[in-house]
Image: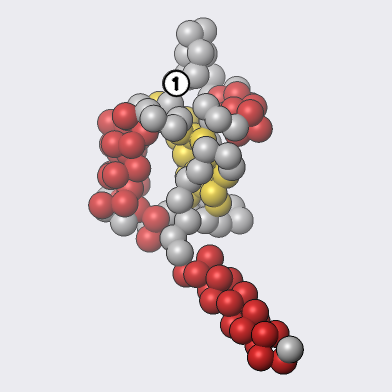
Amino acid sequence: MKPLIAVLLVVIAVIGSLKVLSPQKPSVQGTVTNANTPDIIYYWGEGCSHCESLKKYILENKIEERFQITYKEVWGNQDNLNDLKETAKLCPDIDLSQGIGVPFVFFTADKKCVVGDSPVIEKIEQMIK
């Protein structure tokens, strides 16, 4: 019986360490937060090609090493969609008459909303300089 308990404890420890060591990725079901107070809140949609383009830029340029990013998938998660709607209200310069598009990024430092992969990349590039 004791060897079985020891094996179970080892298995639990290995599984736990894999979860800690594995990189966090956005998921359709939930929200991935890389920090308590993010610099960037990134609202995206599963299957959105512009969202994938922006994620690729973030990964290739190691943007997560410079800024704390929270990822929120909105097409499959109603709570995240509601959060996006509330966040969009903070940005009067964004035209919401036709709905809210993704990728939609909220920069917390200057309370700025940016929609679209290219405009977000331009904003990040300005922040890096």
* Residue 26: percent from left, percent from top: 48, 45
* Residue 120: percent from left, percent from top: 35, 35
Where disc 1 sits, the SS reads loop
Residue tagged by mark 1?
Answer: 101
Q: Colour scheme in the image?
A: secondary structure
* Residue 4: percent from left, percent from top: 67, 85
Query: Can residue 101 be seen from the camera position used here?
Result: yes
Q: Is residue 13 left or right of residue 23?
A: right
Q: Say few, some or many: other residues with alpha carbon within 10 Å of mark 1 (under 14 / 14 to 19 / 20 or more).
A: few
Against 55, is 87 above or below?
Answer: above
* Residue 20: percent from left, percent from top: 53, 68
**Residue with the most extreme top position:** 97
**Residue with the most extreme front position:** 1
Query: Can residue 87 be seen from the camera position used here?
Result: no
Against 127, is 119 above or below?
Answer: above
The structure residue drawn at horizontal position 50% and vertical position 43%, both measured from the top left corner, is: 27
Amino acid type at mark 1: Gly
Against 63, is 107 above or below?
Answer: above
Query: 18 or 7: which is nearer to us?
Result: 7
**Residue with the most extreme right position:** 1
The structure residue drawn at horizontal position 44% and vertical position 32%, both measured from the top left corner, is: 46
Query: 115 or 11: which is nearer to us?
Result: 11
The structure residue drawn at horizontal position 66% and vertical position 91%, both measured from the top left corner, is: 3
